[in-house]
Structures are given as C-alpha cells and as structure tokens.
Image: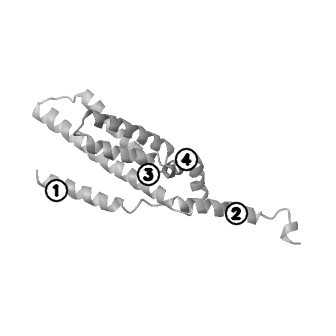
Amino acid sequence: MGEELNPYAAPRSQILAVNADVVRLRQEFLRAEGHLKAFGLLIILLSLMLITAKVMMLKIFFIQDLGMPEIPWPFVALGSLSLLPLIAGMGLYFLKRWAGVVMGVLAVVQILMGIVQLPGGLLEIIVQAAVLRFMLSPRARRVLSSEYQDMIRRTPTIKSRAAAWIHPVIVIIALVVIVLWVSR
C-alpha cells in the first residue's frame, strides 16, 4: 500500500512547507531579535546603575549627612520608579510585547523631560528619540507581535542571541564606572 493511499500517514509536504516558511521568516528577523535583546540588556544594566546610585544617594545625603534615623519614604517612592525600566529591559530581553509599549512610553516621557531641561537635556532627547524610532520600527514591532511569538514557539531549534555591539558597550560602561570609582 502506497503512502498516498494510507489515511494515517502524516501530511509531510504541507508540514514542511509551513515549517520552511516559518523558519525563513524567523531567520529574516533574527538580527532584529538580537538588537532587541541587546537593547534589553543595556536597559537592565543602566537601570541597575541608576538604582545603585539612588541607594547611595539615600545613604549619603539622608542618613549619614543629616543624621536622620528614618528613611524619607517619598524619596524611596520616587526611587522605586527606577524599577520600571529594569522590568521593561527584562521584558525586552525576552521579547515581550508589553515591554515594547512600556519602553515607547518611557522614551516619550524622557523626551518631554529633556525638553523641559533644555539645553542640558539635548543629549537625552537625541538618545530617547533614537530609542523611540527603533521601538516604532516595523522590524521591532514585528518581532514583538503575538504572531511572531508564535513563530518563536514553533521553531525552538533556532536560538537568537543579543547583538554583538552590546559587548563593547558593556565593557566601556564598566571602564567608565571603574575610572569614576577609583578617582573619587
């Protein structure tokens, strides 16, 4: 009995066509996945640095210098807003759709804050505009879409990694932090 007459045989040609198309699309967007993951790592790193700086400010300014036995809770509440970029960075690293929305909103807020702080906020406006442009790009939106998430689930053998540009950036940030730490 031939395969075309066997009603229990798997439809191989249809499955291969669908999988080949999904694999082709996934391969096409691997670079955008890598950039999103690298951007997520960068946001995580910068958020951790911001949280560390705020904890040090809390310790130095409020507890040691002023001799305050208690922690000023409004300062802690405002400082806890630093957790939002950290969580969004983790979401971006894992390619979650909500993280793209959160990063877009944060970029708009940072741009508005930079406009208020002109001319000192000009660099912040430029950086956040680049972030917003990247988050609104068709490739980033496609990678963060629910259809693409389904493609990722259907192709578990294809692994994406963070883009290569993140490694020198992390090294440069680490060197700057070390130099600033040693020179104080």
Q: Residue at x 25, y 30 (%)?
A: 75
Q: Earlier in the sequence, mark 1 or mark 2?
A: 2
**Nearest to N terminus: mark 2 or mark 4:** 2
The alpha-carbon separation of the residues under discs 1 and 2 comes to: 55 Å
Q: Identify residue for label 1.
A: 179
Above or below — where is 141 with respect to 71? below
Q: Earlier in the sequence, mark 1 or mark 4?
A: 4
Amino acid of disc 2 = Ala
Contact between labelled residues 1 and 3, with CB atoms less than 8 Å apart? no
Residue 93 has which mark? Answer: 3
Instruction: Name which of mark 4 and mark 3 comes first in the sequence.
Output: 3
Kindly identify which residue carries mark 2.
17
Q: Which residue is mark 4?
A: 145
Is label 3 in a helix, a strand or a loop?
helix
Q: Is residue 74 left or right of residue 131?
A: left
Whole-percent x, y for residue 121 in the image: 25, 40
Which of 4 and 119 lies nearest the eye of the viewer?
Answer: 119
In the drawing, does residue 6 fall left or right of residue 14?
A: right
| Secondary structure of residue under mark 2 | helix
Give whichever of discs 2 and 3 has the lower sequence position: 2
Across and down, in percent, residue 149 comes to 56, 50
The residue at the point 25 percent across, 59 percent down is 172
Where is residue 134? Give x, y as percent. Answer: 43, 49
Dividing the picture into quarters, in which one does residue 111 lie? top left
Q: Nearer the viewer, residue 130 or 3?
A: 130
